[in-house]
Image: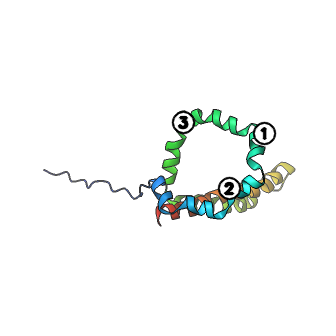
């Protein structure tokens, strides 16, 4: 006898990021853009080395590994761009709701209204661009 329940169908596409990077020729595009040469000419890497940032990052890599950041990244890459689009859109609308709903009765509340706009936009912008990148990576 077969089960009456149909098997669950996953709506998410699984993406192998390294295969997609190769397929989209991201490294070639990076080379053609000249970004690395510009960094070299601007001596940005030397500045990073002098500030000790690279050695700090190097020390943090094992922590990133232990914390499962790579798994999280894989999960995010396989997230639907629609979810990111919904979140960034909500973040864009949030300041308008805050201004409409939070009274202007004291300086603290006005400050909340004022701070909400750049804060929400600064959170929404990477989500917007992330959604666009995911669309390309996932082939949507």
> Front-most of 74 and 40?
40
Relative horizontal placement of residue 114, taking residue 138 as reference (left or right): right
Please state which of the two labelled residues, at mark 1 or mark 3, is closer to the viewer.
1
Q: Which residue is mark 1?
A: 50
Of the residues under marks 2 and 1, which one precedes in the sequence? 2
> Front-most of 20 and 99?
20
Residue 36: image tag: 2
Residue lying at 53% horizontally and 58% vertically, measured from the top left: 83
Using the numbered discs, state the Cα–Cα distance from disc 3 to disc 2 in whole angstroms: 26 Å
Task: Give the percent coordinates (x, y) of residue 116.
Answer: 75, 55
- Secondary structure state at the residue bearing disc 3: helix
Would you say residue 103 is visible in this rendering?
no
Report crowding for label 2: few under 14, some 14 to 19, many 20 or more residues within 10 A (C-alpha). Answer: some
Please state which of the two labelled residues, at mark 3 or mark 2, is closer to the viewer.
2
Report crowding for label 3: few under 14, some 14 to 19, many 20 or more residues within 10 A (C-alpha). Answer: few
Q: Is residue 60 above or below residue 30?
A: above
Q: Which residue is mark 3?
A: 65
Residue lying at 52% horizontally and 38% vertically, measured from the top left: 68
Residue lying at 56% horizontally and 61% vertically, measured from the top left: 28
Would you say residue 15 is visible in this rendering?
yes
Using the numbered discs, state the Cα–Cα distance from disc 1 to disc 3 in whole angstroms: 25 Å
Relative horizontal placement of residue 10, taking residue 58 as reference (left or right): left
- Secondary structure state at the residue bearing disc 1: helix
Report crowding for label 1: few under 14, some 14 to 19, many 20 or more residues within 10 A (C-alpha). Answer: few
């Amino acid at each position: 006898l077969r089960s009456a329940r149909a098997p669950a169908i996953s709506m998410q596409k699984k993406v192998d990021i390294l295969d997609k990077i190769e397929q989209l020729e991201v490294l070639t595009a990076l080379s053609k853009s000249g970004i690395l040469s510009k960094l070299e000419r601007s001596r940005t890497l030397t500045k990073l080395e002098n500030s000790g940032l690279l050695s700090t990052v190097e020390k943090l890599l094992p922590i990133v590994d232990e914390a499962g950041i790579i798994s999280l990244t894989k999960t995010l890459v396989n997230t639907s761009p629609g979810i990111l689009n919904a979140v960034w859109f909500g973040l864009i609308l949030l300041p308008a709701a805050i201004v409409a709903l939070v009274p202007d009765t004291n300086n603290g509340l006005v400050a909340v209204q004022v701070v909400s706009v750049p804060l929400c936009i600064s959170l929404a912008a990477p989500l917007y661009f992330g959604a666009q990148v995911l669309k390309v990576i996932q082939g949507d």
